[in-house]
Image: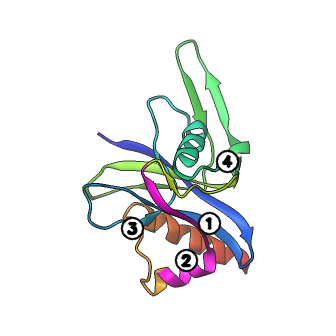
Amino acid sequence: MIYVNVRAIIERNGPNGTEIVIQKRVKSNENKTPYELPGGRLEEFESFMEGLKREVHEETGLHITKILGEETRIETNDVDSNVEAMKPFAVYQTTNGPVDSLGAYFRCQASGNLVKEGDDTMDIKWIPVDELHHSLEKELIDFSWVDKSGIMYYLKWYYAEKQ
């Protein structure tokens, strides 16, 4: 079975430049808890937008106010089906590993305050993008195997945009 996921790259302008939200997931079956991005598995027939908003609120306490790419969303409705199409920031697919999944990353903005602990999450925080980049390069921070490539893709895009 393949799982479909949504992941949020929640951005804000902080005192040290652009910051994003990272968190740790509480997993009783694992001894280490790497950082990851907010998000998770879509429920059956749940839209990307609704799933993203639900997951972010459950895990961080934040309310998504803007999803970049949402303006590209098209929905078609038939007698017995609805389909949506849009342009996310990036997509991923696991090609090996413990879980077969694919998902979409969305750049977002949000309002509200981070909770101390969310739905199976802890150590939820804003981190400056430059600090995240440095920490990944020096292996000072451990990221989940699913989100590491998404973060690296985001950083590559981010620094290309700054030039």
| Helix, strand or loop status at disc 4 | strand
Label 4 to label 1: alpha-carbon separation = 13 Å
The residue that mark 2 highlights is: 132
Q: In this view, does 43 lie to the left or right of 10?
A: left
Q: What stretch is highlighted in magenta?
A: 120-135
- Residue 116 position within the rendered picture, expressed as x and y whole percent measured from the top left: 54, 58
Q: Which amino acid does label 4 sit on?
A: Ile
Going from N to C along the chain, the mark reached first, 4 or 3, is: 3
CA gap between label 2 and label 4 equals 22 Å
The residue that label 4 is drawn on is 64
Q: What residue type is labelled 3?
A: Pro
Q: Distance between the residues labelled 2 and 3?
A: 13 Å
- Percent across and percent down for residue 17 are 72, 76
The residue carrying mark 1 is 20
Using a 10 Å C-alpha cutoff, classify the residue at mark 4 as few (fewer than 14 neighbours), some (14 to 19) or many (20 or more): some
Pick the quarter of the image with the N terminus: top left
The label on residue 34 is 3
Is there a contact, CB below 8 Å, between mark 3 and mark 1?
Answer: no
The C terminus lies in which quarter of the figure? bottom right
Q: Quadrant of residue 32?
A: bottom left
**Magenta stretch containing residue 82, yes or no?**
no
Which picture quadrant has residue 43? top left
Looking at the image, do the residues carrying marks 2 and 4 touch, with CB atoms under 8 Å apart?
no
Is the C-beta separation of discs 2 and 1 under 8 Å? Answer: yes
Specify which label sits upstream in the sequence, 2 or 4.
Answer: 4
Q: How far apart are marks 3 and 1 (CA)?
A: 16 Å
Q: Residue at x 33, y 42 (%)?
A: 2
Circle 1: element type: strand
Q: Which of 117 and 14 is in front in this view?
A: 117
